[in-house]
Image (cartoon, grey):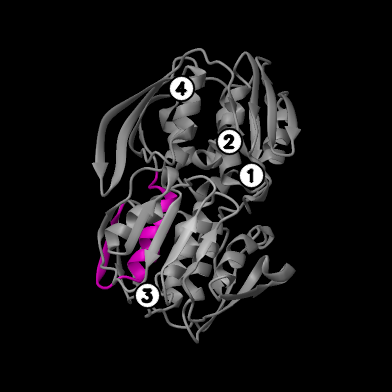
Amino acid sequence: MSGTGQSDEPRELKAGGTLQGRVKVPGDKSISHRSLLFGAIAEGTTTIDGLLPAEDPLSTAACLRAMGVSISLITDGGIVTVEGVGLDGLQEPAEVLDCGNSGTTMRLMLGLLAGRDGRHFVLDGDASLRRRPMRRVGQPLASMGAEVRGRDGGNLAPLAVQGRQLKGTVIGTPVASAQVKSALLLAALTAESPTTVIEPAQSRDHSERMLKAFGADLTVGGEMGRHISVRPGATLQGQNVVVPGDISSAAFWLVAGALIPGADLTIENVGLNPTRTGILEVLEQMGARIEVLNPRDVAGEPVGDLRVTHGPLKPFNFGEQIMPRLVDEVPILSVAACFCEGESRISGASELRVKETDRLAVMARQLKAMGADIDEHEDGMTIRGGRPLKGAVLDSETDHRVAMSLGVAAMLADGNSSLARSEAAAVSYPSFWDELERLRC
């Protein structure tokens, strides 16, 4: 079954019950992508423990293999080894590089490949990825001398990259995007001179942390770490990477545990990087009962276990300032808002309109089908909670985060629901539906 939603049978979702027990979420998707990419251009072997064996990182691995990188079989729970080819060792592929449904793969590949002087690459993906904007990466790369062409003036895939010797520069990014920043940092590794990337607000910083660990000459400065500079010339060395659990996947259990009467869940080994913990800040604002247990540091990333128990929740209000730290959690938070007495407001979230789907429109449409009181805005939603949701015929519309969010909403509805294209969850959390059944009681 494809994780982008090609199954025949809708999934039946039973209402009622509670959730109890311990759960380990899949490895962090952002760190999984980066460990493969940085391992590929390092010298020597990189081992990755806990890599997410879902469709998006598999797309990254497939693209790297097509360029001559040896990567061991990726299985659930196995150690993955990457035999690095060095900064200039990627071969020109014989075929189109297929990025599947993964925007991260395509955007980071653009940065990785733009500086491969004299080599030519073509990047493509599925129908959903072909609709996602890529000029936000191609335009700043062009200021370094990169040549990226595609549909709609280089904004839409398929994209052709003609490798060039890039020049270092100072680049201000228009949006706080870890994907844009990471693409520029990858390009900067082989530029002729230093590059500085300046963000309007700090986005997730996994690339900076990991590139430093691999040996890049990288410095972070400026207010809130918004200025990142790379001096080319350093050789990256293979590392042993331990991938923590993905807080974006943990978010479904955190919200479910806070909402569902009688729930008591412990989510183990969750990455608590401060650029990713906006979900915890909003849940704290709502009065959710969450404890951080056994906090520790693993390979430069803060990690802990999170225990959540059910309790009453207050409505929330958040906007653009926190968005880089919780952009992927907006769908499940829109579900949470339906069960808070009073009005919740999400703003500054226009970025969600260019994800795997238009997540604002899709969540509003699906939750309204269950009877939710929602106004959709250009950059967010207003949700008036406290009205009971009813079981309904639902559709993930091929989006993994929508699928899992609706799975949680359906447990709390009056009456059972059905969910079309539920297997979209496999993009980031292949075992989600199995875990939901295991924890249910």
Q: CA distance from mark 2 to mark 3?
A: 36 Å
**SS under mark 4:** helix
Q: Quadrant of residue 210?
A: bottom left
Q: Earlier in the sequence, mark 2 or mark 4?
A: 4
Q: Earlier in the sequence, mark 1 or mark 3?
A: 3
Q: Where residue 24 appears, x then y in whole percent?
A: 35, 38
**Which residue does the numbered mark 2 point to in the structure image?**
330
- The one nearer the camera, 311 or 104, is 104
Q: Is residue 42 above or below residue 413?
A: below
Q: CA distance from mark 2 to mark 4?
A: 15 Å
Amino acid type, label 1: Leu
**Which residue does the numbered mark 3 point to in the structure image?**
69
Could you tell whether 271 is left or right of 313 in the image? left
Q: Quadrant of residue 267?
A: top left
Q: Earlier in the sequence, mark 2 or mark 3?
A: 3
Q: Where residue 116 appears, x then y in whole percent?
A: 46, 80
Q: CA distance from mark 1 to mark 4?
A: 23 Å
Q: Earlier in the sequence, mark 4 or mark 3?
A: 3
Q: CA distance from mark 2 to mark 1?
A: 8 Å
- Do we see residue 81 in this rendering? yes
Pointers 1 and 3 in contact (C-beta within 8 Å): no
Mark 2 vs mark 3: give the one in front. 2
**Which residue does the numbered mark 4 point to in the structure image?**
284
